[in-house]
Image: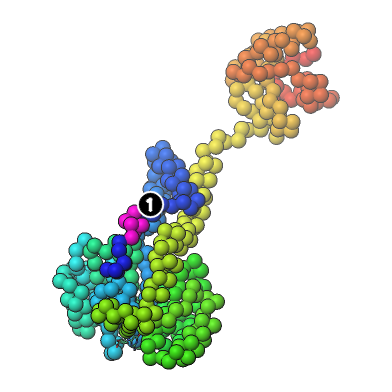
Amino acid sequence: MTTDHQIDPRFRTKPHGNYIDINQLYCYREQLGIIRDADSKRAKACQDLLNRIDALLNDLDNPMRVVVAGGFNAGKSTFLNALVNQRIMPVGAVRSTCTVNVLQGGKQRELIIQWRNGRHGRHEYRSYQNDADAQQQIDALMKTEHHSIAQIAVCCPNQPFLERFTLIDTPGLDHNAQDSAASAAEVQRADALIWVLHNKGAEKLDYEQIVQFCTANPDSPVIVILNQVDALEEDELHDALTATQNKLNAHVTAVLPLSAKLASEGQAKKDHTKLDASHFYDLRNYLQHHLFDQYRTLQEKIRFQRRSQPLIAELQRFIKEVTAQQQPAAPPLINSRYADLGDGTVLDTFTNLQWMRCALGQTWDGKNCVSEAKKFKLNDAKKAASKSNYSGCSDWRLPTIYELKTLVINGKNPTINKRAFPNTPSS
Ligand SMILES: Nc1nc2c(ncn2[C@@H]2O[C@H](COP(=O)(O)OP(=O)(O)OP(=O)(O)O)[C@@H](O)[C@H]2O)c(=O)[nH]1
Ligand SMILES: [Mg+2]
């Protein structure tokens, strides 16, 4: 993450999903592929669903979006610079962040400017030499063109940490309507939120925004930083921290103190007294354990699980519909009772017994029973039934007397349903 924080090998590998939803999606993927290839009418619907599954699975590999937000001049950019131990994000006593500025991985040192109006195309790429150069270019762009810029991304090569995490610096939320809207949109899309407060603690706006985010994103870590604590005496710090924790602890993951200014100065001058006084190491360790080290779990939980639920519900509906239509149509019923199985047999839907429509010795010609029925003694009839291969089945048996009686229609001649059992000889 930083120069004194060596590359963590976990950030080199791709995450593997162990969540049941992920495996389920892979199964649906296979089924959809089969349906798409077999059924041209459904090919497009299948492909659309396949694309959505792939987009969701690919999204697991996209870096986690960690958004730094808070009030104007709270010290967001100073904190972010300290976190990555680089001096890229413009910092200042006057309003210094007027666009959404993103720190991300990349192959070369370049700024990607996303224009609102497409004047230079939607994206413009500019290279930068070093941190100071990047900061100056961003500063200049923000001063002259910030109304036309949606976002400036700084690509930092050789930063494995940034291949897994995108850090997003936002304009102070309370400054003006356009910037606040841009910041609020980033907060809404955040996987994790770091909220920077002035040392006075959470104002009304901070509180409302934090609670709103926590309610909408119960699985996302929300870490609140009480910044600028260098300006507080020890007892003031204690009081301010306790008050802020009491106010927010029920909603957020943690409230931690910081002096981003001392952290930044301590890093620049390698001054450990300042760094110790800044509470920076405690904060960084906390972030490491509760946010950065939890990358895979959080990514799957926050980003994937929630979004997969509606898609899985849709996939279930689609597959159910396809399967229902692939089932053979229910066979027609004779006299609302005997299901014609089409092979010279019927299924009595009252008793669930399958019957030959013809007597032994007769054959089914597709419509009728032809030729003479044979007469057997009981034992011979049993043997003949068990040997019969009528309609391709070899497990025939004589019915019991009670089973036989279920076919009998008293008072009619023949005493059996003539449509289900045509040409039945009278006994
Ligand atoms: N005393 C003190 N000053 C700080 C601290 N952190 C930041 N500052 C100062 O506060 C001013 C604003 O810092 P920034 O990091 O630009 O604050 P920001 O929240 O990014 O500001 P905007 O992006 O303009 O909303 C700068 O002059 C910083 O030097 C701190 O911990 N202590
Ligand atoms: Mg800023």
Q: Is residue 196 visible?
A: no
**Residue drawn at the location 24% of the way across and 67% of the way down:** 155
Kind of residue sitting beneath label 1: Asp
Inspect the magenta stretch and tell me whether residue 12 lies in it.
yes
Where residue 125 appears, x then y in whole percent? 18, 68
**Residue drawn at the location 38% of the way across and 72% of the way down:** 284
Tell me: 208 left or right of 419: left
Where residue 279 appears, x then y in whole percent? 39, 79
Q: Quadrant location of the N terminus? A: bottom left
**Residue drawn at the location 51% of the way across and 69% of the way down:** 218
Please tell me whether the stretch drawn in magenta is mainly helix, strand or loop.
helix
Query: Which residue is the site of mark 1?
Result: 54
**Residue drawn at the location 71% of the way across and 27% of the way down:** 353
Mark 1 is surrounded, within 10 Å at the Cα level, by few (under 14), some (14 to 19) or many (20 or more) other residues, namely some
Q: Quadrant location of the C terminus? A: top right
- The image quarter in which residue 164 lies: bottom left
Where residue 274 appears, x then y in whole percent? 33, 83
- The image quarter in which residue 100 lies: bottom left
